[in-house]
Image: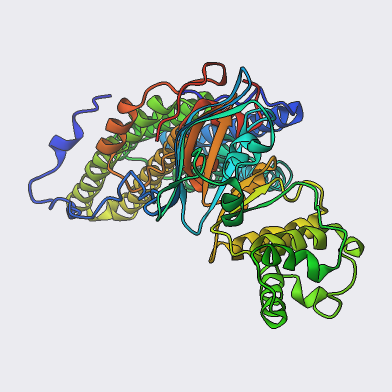
């Protein structure tokens, strides 16, 4: 068989096939990315020590304004420690030390600076914990607590602010008619939303969530996730979660930490479909190291 | 990371699921490859029994497509795969569609072949098809090979070869036109040859698609409708990612 013979058989009278125009544009290989353009806060070379133990090692990430940033990583990787730096929770413990800075924009305050009052920081950076921890008082007093601390005494203003915070936490419809009842009578999911309302009442700039749904059932979890997605319109959210699907669902940016180091920080969609680092890949796909 | 790693999940059932899925795709690929081989035998050797066999094999290929898609849905629902696992499942959902279509095209070649078995079969009409058929068989085999090993570099080489098939297809068309000019009584037969050339060319395109899914699985880049030159430069620019053991300072 002579493979090369046949083109020679074609007489010149046979017109060639129409040529496809070469200009048909190709798509770009690189997808457009959205880097954090206007960070609300910037973590700069943050290290943290519990006595002689260094729990965080030189971490730098931007925290995008009015977006959700999730921190993921195996237990003991330092993600809760990292989160707690933002509102100086570690100051309550002895023999701890911060290095580096967490700069809050636009005033450029260093949240972990020695000269910055931790009480003032906590007024501006709210926190919600793993287990709902309402005060053993009425629903109203739980939310009004932070406002009273700020010196607000006017009943009308308090009532207005409490309602706003409860609406913000998607709880008003359920408890609006029984504000004087004990907060301890609420369900777990409601208690957690009450804690979110309590944190929202002081109009924080950043809201920290430390595994807010790990003690809740799927429905309550879905409500909290939905709430976090709406909160994003007003407040910057930083969340620690062990649930990878949750991080994938609700976060805009995701940071993966391992042994006190930041391994990868990127858009959530990128981290969960095509992470750059093998370590991130191994963790989110559930592989051994 | 030239070859994706399907094992080492903490949940060993997940390893087993993915391995099973991949081996089912390879089995389906094997069936389709055999179908193409039979179809070309029916055509080139006038073997009508082989042509009938191709048509019968279609049933099995179709049922494999459905069962693999089912399995993918189940894995998506129950395991919520991420990163390379997710890309593998997505790539498989697409790959089985292309495999099934290769089967369809082979079926066309097969039944035209068996239809011609009892007719006069001018030898020069088959010369071009023999050549085109061989090139197409090679590209399908190599694409499946790249998929089996999740070898993106091979996949890129194979995808680039699709251009050759397009050139062969053009030559085949011109050859058929020549036969029609030379002898108008051969027009019916030459038109059938054109259909066959078209089917073979489409098979090449589907094989190229499979190669693109392999590159997507391994590198996480969707290379459809992207210039192959860009893809090649990107692949060469990549360095080896780190493993969990050697956690390095963060980039970005």
Residue at the extreme left of the image, as rendered: A12
Q: Is residue A259 left or right of residue A140?
A: left
Q: Is residue A66 left or right of residue A168?
A: left
Residue A37: x percent and y percent? 36, 52
Which one is in front, A74 or B230? A74
Q: Is residue B140 left or right of residue B84?
A: left
Which one is in front, B75 or A288? A288
Q: Is residue A223 left or right of residue A111?
A: right
Answer whether residue B53 is visible to the viewer in this image.
no
Which one is in front, A131 or B18? A131
Residue A230: x percent and y percent? 60, 66
Please name the residue shown 17% across and 37% down the image.
A7
Which one is in front, A20 or A27? A27
Please name the residue shown 90% across and 66% down the image.
A182
Residue at the extreme bottom of the image, as rendered: A156
Establish if A23 lies above or below A46. below
Answer whether residue B203 is visible to the viewer in this image.
yes
The image quadrant where one finds the N terminus of chain A is top left
Splitting the image into 4 quarters, where does residue A54 fall? top right
State the scheme by which the image is colored. rainbow
Residue B29: x percent and y percent? 56, 34
The image quadrant where one finds the C terminus of chain A is top right
Please name the residue shown 79% across and 59% down the image.
A220
Residue A106: x percent and y percent? 40, 56
């Amino acid at each position: 068989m002579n493979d090369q013979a046949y083109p020679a058989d074609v007489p010149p009278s046979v017109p060639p096939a129409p040529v496809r125009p070469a200009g048909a544009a190709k798509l770009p290989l690189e997808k457009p990315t959205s880097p954090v353009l206007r960070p609300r806060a910037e973590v700069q070379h943050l290290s943290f020590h519990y006595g002689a133990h260094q729990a965080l090692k030189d971490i730098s990430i931007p925290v995008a304004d009015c977006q959700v940033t999730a921190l993921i990583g195996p237990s003991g990787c330092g993600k809760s420690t990292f989160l707690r730096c933002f509102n100086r929770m570690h100051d309550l413990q002895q023999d701890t030390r911060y290095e580096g800075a967490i700069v809050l924009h636009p005033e450029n305050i260093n949240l972990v600076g020695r000269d910055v009052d931790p009480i003032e920081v906590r007024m501006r950076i709210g926190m919600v914990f793993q287990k709902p921890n309402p005060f053993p008082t009425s629903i109203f007093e739980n939310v009004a607590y932070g406002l009273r601390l700020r010196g607000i005494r006017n009943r009308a203003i308090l009532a207005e602010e409490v309602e706003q915070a409860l609406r913000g936490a998607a709880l008003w419809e359920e408890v609006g008619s029984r504000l004087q009842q004990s907060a301890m009578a609420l369900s777990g999911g409601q208690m957690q939303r009450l804690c979110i309302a309590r944190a929202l009442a002081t109009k924080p700039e950043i809201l920290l969530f430390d595994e807010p749904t790990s003690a809740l059932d799927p429905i309550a979890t879905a409500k909290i996730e939905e709430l976090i997605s709406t909160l994003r319109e007003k407040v910057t959210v930083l969340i620690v979660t062990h649930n990878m699907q949750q991080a994938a669902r609700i976060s805009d940016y995701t940071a993966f930490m391992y042994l006190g180091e930041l391994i990868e920080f990127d858009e959530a969609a990128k981290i969960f479909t095509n992470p750059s680092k093998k370590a991130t890949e191994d963790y989110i796909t559930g592989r051994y190291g | 990371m030239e070859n994706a790693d399907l094992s080492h999940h903490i949940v060993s059932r997940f390893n087993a699921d993915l391995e099973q899925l991949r081996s089912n795709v390879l089995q389906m690929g094997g069936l389709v490859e055999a179908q193409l081989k039979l179809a070309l035998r029916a055509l080139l050797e006038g073997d009508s029994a082989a042509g009938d066999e191709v048509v019968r094999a279609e049933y099995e290929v179709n049922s494999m497509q459905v069962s693999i898609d089912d399995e993918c849905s189940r894995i998506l629902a129950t395991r919520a795969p991420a990163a390379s696992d997710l890309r593998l499942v997505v790539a498989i959902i697409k790959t089985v569609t292309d495999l099934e279509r290769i089967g369809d095209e082979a079926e066309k070649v097969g039944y035209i072949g068996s239809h011609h078995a009892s007719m006069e079969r001018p030898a020069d009409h088959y010369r071009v098809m023999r050549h085109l058929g061989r090139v197409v068989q090679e590209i399908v085999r190599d694409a499946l090979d790249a998929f089996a090993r999740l070898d993106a570099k091979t996949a890129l080489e194979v995808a680039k070869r699709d251009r050759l098939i397009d050139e062969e297809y053009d030559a085949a068309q011109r050859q058929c036109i020549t036969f029609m000019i030379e002898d108008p009584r051969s027009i019916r037969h030459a038109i059938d040859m054109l259909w066959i050339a078209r089917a073979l060319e489409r098979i090449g395109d589907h094989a190229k698609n499979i190669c693109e899914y392999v590159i997507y699985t391994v590198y996480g880049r969707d290379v459809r409708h992207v210039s192959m030159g860009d893809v090649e430069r990107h692949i060469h620019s990549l360095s080896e990612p780190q493993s969990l053991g050697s956690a390095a300072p963060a980039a970005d």
